Image (spheres, rainbow, N blue to C red):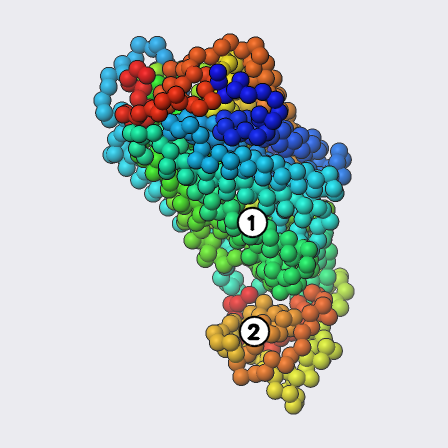
């Protein structure tokens, strides 16, 4: 946070710095008010009854069967409770889907950043190929789409000021999208307990004005974009021997594959998203494409998570139109 | 001749078949576990006074919060009310001389102790650092702690729950006194019955999950570790399929106790008895359908998240109904504010806040922020400590004269109730704000801006410790020096108050006949 030096804070209004954080705050405070009223009501009733009907008080206790059960009263207080609950459920659900399954940004441009969590650090790779550890630089106003995986146990990518969190799983790609709206440095935490130095698995998202960000990019070494590296790895690991155009081995063609449905030998179809591509490299027998023999060898433990992300980025780049898939 | 002086010597206790003595065995053992878990919590709170991890090493800190969670959940909260007051009172409330299966009852205590021994061994033999949730693949492939021993302990103690559950179900069905129809049962019995159903149906899922975890850790057979072709999300599903209903294993008996106490100290029949009974059953049923709300950001389908959120909101409706009905019970009552009532009113207030903040975390967009932060920690402590432990204290004080034949010192008990209420709120309310501001749970060191609220929280924990140690002292004192209690010191209704305090060994000389509703406070007993 911007003024983290001050350790004596009540933190009632934590920093709010993404395109969704304001909406989350509105929902939060609406619920605080609604629930606060309920708490006030219940405590008032407890107090009033407690004083008025204390043992020995002169208040009238004239009896009636309605003192012991009253169907209309039960229905009467259930319905408003249910209605309020359904209202907040719907509000929360709509916003949740918007945050975790967001539409492609309006300008169609999302900056794709690869994220690898490992005990106990965060590793990032920018689309230009720039690598960072525990710090992620981004430009204010630009949508960032993270493709995340873990090298070991479950971690969770959490930036409180952006009101976003997503678990990061081994052998699995999860994604998270955000658009920062404020310049500043914002804490990044691992939120899923991951062992000895769990609380040391922290970092920062540095949000810069666009021009400064361009300068920052220009100052950094560019070892090659993930796609370019992926293309090289595609040959190096021998993928092109079977999946290349001139190959004599009968293997599925990868051009135009990304985002398309794939019929399986076992029946059913899967969508060729990043997870599918990764599984096909590491666990090739998991999804055998219909009409092909299960002859692909597994590359499990032979290709690092970094290289898998590059290969995936390369194969993805063979499909020109960018579909709205993970 | 009562059950306490019916036999002397260690053997008369360790081989007893009397449900009242088995209850004592549990009282003593879970009190030990409560203070062990409390000691671990004390170390955690001491560490968190400063942002830097300076009091304990990271490893020791991780072991302390894991020990706290495992001991408090499985060795205190889950057995607490059913195994102690449930064992003591169920036959008395039903007009029976004992449980349906007295030997099974004793055996479930031995199974409990065996499970406890395994877990304590795990603590001594290297500790455990997985948290009480045992998430894979950390627990199976990465942790260096004594995971197998601890998991074995939890596996074994599960059978204790199952045996107790079966015993309660059969006893409630078959041992009710003549005239004691289902809708004349005290709500405490309804609550024990519903809890027993959950114990019998949910605990086996935990047992199976722990076996699978053990198989993966010991033999490397891939079930949850994706490196071996397993699925870590599957573990989360299986774990929470048990562990969410387990919250209701803790909570429903608490609701049962509070209903008894409120009716007695308002001197009035419970408002909406049938609604209260059916809402207990509804909570037990819906409790099985909401486990996925622990996994909104786990990577499970977000549309599954939407369904689990809706179901979680629905389970809140019967809980809200119970609060309203307790309030309506107070209306036109004759309210006394003795210590059991103070603890029961604390329960209502704290459970209300715990329940409403549960609605916050059931709200999908808010849970993205709050999941795995101190907001969740505060929320479930409001339910389990503010709710469940307050109810345990309410019940303990309410039935103490019946169990021991002695009155506790009322003034000290009221002081304790007030200290616990204030200390509890000071400990856990700041944690809601910490979580909303983004402080993750299970952090050994934390960012500096979180310090002030953590200092409040640790100060509250100190008060809480005093509030819980006081009863230990004055209750023990009262065993020897407390005034003799009559059969019915509170002018309460119910079969347990018709016998002497302490009750005779065989409970009832002649089988009682019941010809009125529960809570007949409008007629003299």
Left/right placement of residue B266 relative to residue A103 reads: left
| Whether residue A33 is visible | no
**Location of residue B251 in the rendering, given as x and y in whole percent from the top left corner:** 47, 35
Q: Position of residue B498 (x, y in %)?
A: 38, 19
Q: Which mark is residue A221?
A: none
Asked whether disc 2 touches disc 1, contact meaning CB atoms under 8 Å apart, the reply is: no
Quarter of the figure with residue B97: top left
Residue in front for this viewpoint, A196 or B96: B96
Q: Is residue B404 above or below residue B111?
A: above
**Which one is nearer the viewer's eye here, B386 or B25?**
B25
Q: Position of residue A42 (x, y in %)?
A: 39, 27
Depth order, front residue of A138/B268: B268
Mark 1: which secondary structure?
helix
Q: Residue at x 69, y 65 (%)?
A: A305
Q: What is the distance, in whole Å, between disc 2 and disc 1 at their CAs?
A: 32 Å
Front-most of B514 and B235?
B514
Within 10 angstroms of label 2, few (less than 14), some, or many (20 or more) residues?
Answer: many
Q: Which residue is mark 1?
A: B207
Q: Which residue is mark 2?
A: A287
Which residue: 59% across, 44% down?
A: B156
């Amino acid at each position: 946070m911007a003024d983290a030096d001050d350790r004596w804070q009540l933190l009632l209004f934590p920093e709010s710095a993404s395109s969704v954080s304001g909406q989350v705050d509105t929902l939060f405070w609406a619920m605080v008010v609604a629930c606060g009223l309920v708490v006030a009501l219940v405590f008032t009733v407890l107090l009033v009854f407690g004083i008025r009907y204390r043992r020995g008080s002169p208040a009238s206790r004239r009896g009636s069967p309605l003192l012991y059960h009253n169907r209309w009263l039960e229905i009467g207080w259930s319905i408003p409770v249910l209605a309020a609950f359904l209202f907040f459920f719907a509000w929360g659900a709509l916003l949740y889907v918007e945050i975790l399954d967001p539409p492609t940004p309006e300008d169609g441009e999302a900056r794709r950043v690869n994220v690898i969590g490992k005990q106990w650090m965060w590793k990032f790779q920018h689309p230009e190929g720039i690598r960072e550890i525990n710090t992620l630089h981004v430009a204010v106003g630009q949508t960032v789409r993270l493709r995340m995986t873990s090298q070991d146990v479950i971690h969770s990518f959490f930036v409180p000021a952006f009101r976003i969190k997503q678990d990061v799983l081994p052998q699995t790609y999860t994604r998270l999208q955000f658009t920062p709206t404020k310049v500043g440095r914002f804490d990044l935490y691992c939120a899923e307990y991951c062992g000895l130095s769990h609380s040391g698995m922290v970092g920062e998202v540095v949000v810069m004005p666009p021009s400064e960000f361009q300068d920052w990019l220009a100052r950094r070494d560019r070892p090659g974009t993930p796609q370019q590296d992926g293309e090289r790895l595609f040959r190096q690991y021998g993928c092109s021997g079977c999946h290349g155009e001139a190959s004599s081995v009968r293997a599925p063609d990868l051009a135009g594959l990304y985002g398309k449905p794939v019929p399986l030998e076992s029946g059913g179809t899967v969508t060729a998203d990043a997870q599918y591509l990764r599984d096909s490299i590491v666990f090739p027998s998991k999804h055998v494409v219909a009409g092909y023999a299960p002859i692909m060898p597994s590359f499990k433990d032979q290709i690092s998570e970094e290289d898998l992300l590059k290969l995936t980025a390369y194969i993805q780049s063979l499909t020109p139109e960018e579909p709205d898939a993970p | 001749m009562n059950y306490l002086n019916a036999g002397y010597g260690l053997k008369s206790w360790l081989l007893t078949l009397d449900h009242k003595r088995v209850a004592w065995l549990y009282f003593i053992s879970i009190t030990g576990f409560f203070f062990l878990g409390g000691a671990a919590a004390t170390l955690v709170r001491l560490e968190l006074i400063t942002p830097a991890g300076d009091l304990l090493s990271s490893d020791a800190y991780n072991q302390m919060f894991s020990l706290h969670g495992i001991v408090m959940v499985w060795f205190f909260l889950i057995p607490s009310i059913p195994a102690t007051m449930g064992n003591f009172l169920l036959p008395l409330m039903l007009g029976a001389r004992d449980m349906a299966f007295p030997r099974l009852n004793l055996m479930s205590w031995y199974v409990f102790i065996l499970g406890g021994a395994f877990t304590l061994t795990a603590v001594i033999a290297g500790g455990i650092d997985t948290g009480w949730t045992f998430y894979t693949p950390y627990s199976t492939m990465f942790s260096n702690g004594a995971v197998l021993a601890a998991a074995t302990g939890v596996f074994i103690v599960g059978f204790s729950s199952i045996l107790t559950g079966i015993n309660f179900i059969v006893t409630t069905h078959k041992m009710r006194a003549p005239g004691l129809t289902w809708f004349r049962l005290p709500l405490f019995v309804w609550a024990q019955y519903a809890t027993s159903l959950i114990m019998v149906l949910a605990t086996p899922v935990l047992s199976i999950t722990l076996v699978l975890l053990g198989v993966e850790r010991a033999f490397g057979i891939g079930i949850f570790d994706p490196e071996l072709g397993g699925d870590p999300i599957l573990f989360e599903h299986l774990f929470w399929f048990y562990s969410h209903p387990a919250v209701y294993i803790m909570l429903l008996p608490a609701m049962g106790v509070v209903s008894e106490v409120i009716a007695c100290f308002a001197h009035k029949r419970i408002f909406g008895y049938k609604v209260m009974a059916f809402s207990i059953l509804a909570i037990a049923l819906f409790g099985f359908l909401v486990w996925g709300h622990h996994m909104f950001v786990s990577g499970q389908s977000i549309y599954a998240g939407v369904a689990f959120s809706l179901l979680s909101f629905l389970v809140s409706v019967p809980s809200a109904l119970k609060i309203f009905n307790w309030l309506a019970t107070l209306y036109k009552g004759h309210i006394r504010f003795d210590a059991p009532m103070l603890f029961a009113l604390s329960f209502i207030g704290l459970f209300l806040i715990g329940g409403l903040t549960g609605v916050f975390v059931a709200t999908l967009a808010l849970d993205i922020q709050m999941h795995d932060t101190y907001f969740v920690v505060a929320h479930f402590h409001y339910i389990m400590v503010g709710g469940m432990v307050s109810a345990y204290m309410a019940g303990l004080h309410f039935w103490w004269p019946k169990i021991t034949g002695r009155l506790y010192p009322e003034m000290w008990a009221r002081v304790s109730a007030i200290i616990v209420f204030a200390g509890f709120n000071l400990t856990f309310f700041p944690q809601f704000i910490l979580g909303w501001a983004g402080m993750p749970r299970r952090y050994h060191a934390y960012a500096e801006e979180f310090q002030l609220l953590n200092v409040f929280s640790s100060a509250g924990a100190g008060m809480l410790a005093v509030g819980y140690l006081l009863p230990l002292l004055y209750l023990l004192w009262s065993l020897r020096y407390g005034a003799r209690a009559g059969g019915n010191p509170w002018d309460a209704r119910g079969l347990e108050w018709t016998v002497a305090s302490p009750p005779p060994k065989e409970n009832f000389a002649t089988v009682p006949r019941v010809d009125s509703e529960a809570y007949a406070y409008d007629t003299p007993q």
